[in-house]
Amino acid sequence: MKVKFWGVRGSIPVPGPDTVRTGGNTLCVEVQTLDRETIILDAGTGIRLLGLDLARRPMSRLVAVILFSHTHWDHIQGLPFFYPARQKHNRLVIMGERRVGMQLEQVLAGQMHDAYLPFTLEDLQADLLIKEVRDGERFVIGNQTVVLPRRLPHPGGVFGFRISCQGKVIVYATDVNHPLEGLAPEVIDLAQGADLLIHDAQFTVEEKQRCVDWGHSSWLEAVQVAQEANVRQVALFHHDPMHTDNDLEEIEAQAQALFPSAFLAREGMEVLV
C-alpha cells in the first residue's frame, strides 16, 4: 500500500518559514490500497492539496472513502474545499462516528452554515454517501480491504482505524490520550503487528506532564506503543502548532535513538507498506 501525508499538523494550520520542512497543513492522509482503493483519513486543510492532485490524475471518475477519526475542527475544516467533492461524476463515501448526540451529516453540514461559508453541504455536487459506523464494526472497502474502527481515549471520543489488505496493515491512531500510569491497552491491541503505525505525537515528554488531559500523546508514548505492539515502523503525527521544524527534528532524533524506524510524518512524504 502507498501512504501519502497531505497534512500533519494538529489544532490549526501554521504556514511560515519555521514549518516549511515539516508542513503546516492540518491532518489528512491518503492511502492507496493494494486492490486500488482510495482511502482518505481525515479532512483537515491538507485535503485541499490532495483534491487538486487527484484532479490532475488520469481517471474518469474518483471513487473514494473518507474516514473521520472524529470531527474536531482540525480534522474537518478542509472538506468544503476538497475539489473532487464539487464534481458530479465523483462518488465519496464518508464514514465516522455519531458525535455529541448529532448525526455525522449534521456535524459536517454545520461548518458550512451561511454564517461561516457562502455555500452548503448540499452545494457539493459529487455523489456523497455519509454513513455512521460503530466501535468494532468491521467493514470492507472494495474486494479485499478490511477496516476496523476502534474507539480510543480522547475527550469526546476518537476512532482509530486498522486497515488491512493482502497481508499488509496500516494503523491510524491520532488524538490518543494515554494515561500517565501507562499505555492505553486498546491502542496497543489495535496496532498489534502493523507494518505502519501513524500515531499522535503532539507533545514532548515534559509537555505531556503539563497537558495530561488535553487528549494527545508524547512522542515517547508513540514509540512505546510501537515497541509494545511489535510494529515495523511508526510515523510521528499531529505535530503541535508551536513546534518548529528544528523542534520536530530534535524529537525525531530522540525517537530514533529508541526505535530506529520511527520518523516524522512530513507533508508530501510518501511511504510504501
Image (spheres, rainbow, N blue to C red):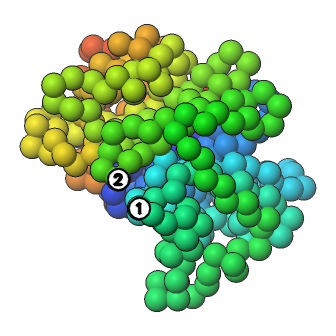
Q: Quadrant of residue 253?
A: top left
Q: Which mark is residue 156?
A: 2
User: From what the image shows, is residue 238 above or below residue 11?
Assistant: above
Which residue occupies 61% across, 43% down? 30
Q: Amino acid at mark 1?
A: Val
Q: Nearer the viewer, residue 271 or 88?
A: 88
Is there CB contact under 8 Å for labels 2 and 1?
Answer: yes
Sequence-wise, which precedes: disc 2 or disc 1?
Answer: 1
Q: Quadrant of residue 84?
A: bottom right
* Residue 78 percent across, percent down from the top left: 53, 64
Which residue occupies 86% across, 56% down? 61
Q: Residue furthest front?
A: 101
Q: Secondary structure at mark 1?
A: loop
Q: Quadrant of residue 109?
A: bottom right
Along the horizontal axis of the image, is 140 left or right of 204? Answer: right
Q: Nearer the viewer, residue 141 or 273?
A: 141
